[in-house]
Image: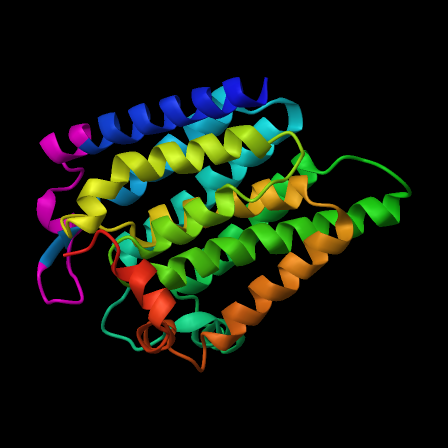
Amino acid sequence: MGARRLALGGAVAAGVTAAARVAFDRRPPGGEARWTRVNHRGEPISLLEGPAVAAGLAAGALVAGRGRGRIAGVTAAVGAGAFGLVDDLAEDTSTRTKGLRGHLGALAQGRLTTGGLKVLGIGATSIVAAAAGTRKTGSAAQWCGDVVVNGALIAGAANLANLLDLRPGRALKAASALAVVPVGGPLAAAGTGAVLGAGAAAWPGDLGERDMLGDSGANALGALVGARLALGLPRPLRLAALAGVVGLNLASERVSFSAVIAQTPWLKAVDDLGRR
């Protein structure tokens, strides 16, 4: 049953991602210029990969997930992808508000940036996904605690994947590696299939530096990976995973992941794999 759901989720996610990307390319919503950015080489690159991947992830989770896992996976991917897309298309590039600290600082001053809206929106949809997917065992207080932990893990993973989307293939590789971590739960096989399938469809454009995930694709990818872990790991491992995700998010405020990767030979070898 697990192998069938994995194959089904992968096939559906890959098919929907590829089909959506072709459709978007033929008729980009709002025109091609709206979706064009400049990559780390200073070359033009398209953000259309992002919503295509988010659609593929949601479709894979919807078709191959089961019960509460299906609801949680779709909610996590759609919510993170939608709020990421708002930040992709409506971000005010004239300001220097960056990172969680910058956006939360702006909120504290009564100023809502698109990044701040994304933080709030993904946080809210992650809690909804966690509430839908968390099995009710023990007392109400225990269940509420699990929902908070699971929601934080989903939201934290969504943001972490976005932080990795600075070089071709980096976020896809990280998400794929985490998607094959053995877990149980109602999203285990479906989540793995959806992430690997959508990633496989996006791989050529991303590594070929024609496309990038952007906030929409990276946030959706991380959210589904986070939901899979949140619903499939026992409580002690979930807490450990959350601590790791929070730690990496906080470290990113002071440390450049790209610099660390460049200075670590085995990480650099993985990062360069398949790239120009």
Residue at image point 38% right, 22% down: 12
Image location of residue 142, percent across then percent down: 85, 48
In this rendered view, identify the residue nearer to me: 200 or 19. 200
Residue 274 locus on image (x, y percent):
22, 51
Q: Quadrant of residue 24?
A: top left
- Position above or below: 258 against 197: below
**The residue stretch that appears in magenta:** 22-43
70 is within the stretch colored magenta: no
Image location of residue 122, percent across then percent down: 51, 51
Quarter holding the C terminus is bottom left
Q: Does the magenta segment cover residue 31?
A: yes
- Residue 95: x, y in percent? 28, 75
Residues 98 and 95: in front is: 98
Residue 139 relative to residue 146: left or right: right
Seen at 62% across and 56% down, the residue is: 152
Whether residue 114 is visible to the viewer of this picture, yes or no, is no
From what the image shows, is residue 236 above or below residue 137? below
Quadrant of res 128:
top right
Q: Residue 23 vs residue 176: left or right? A: left
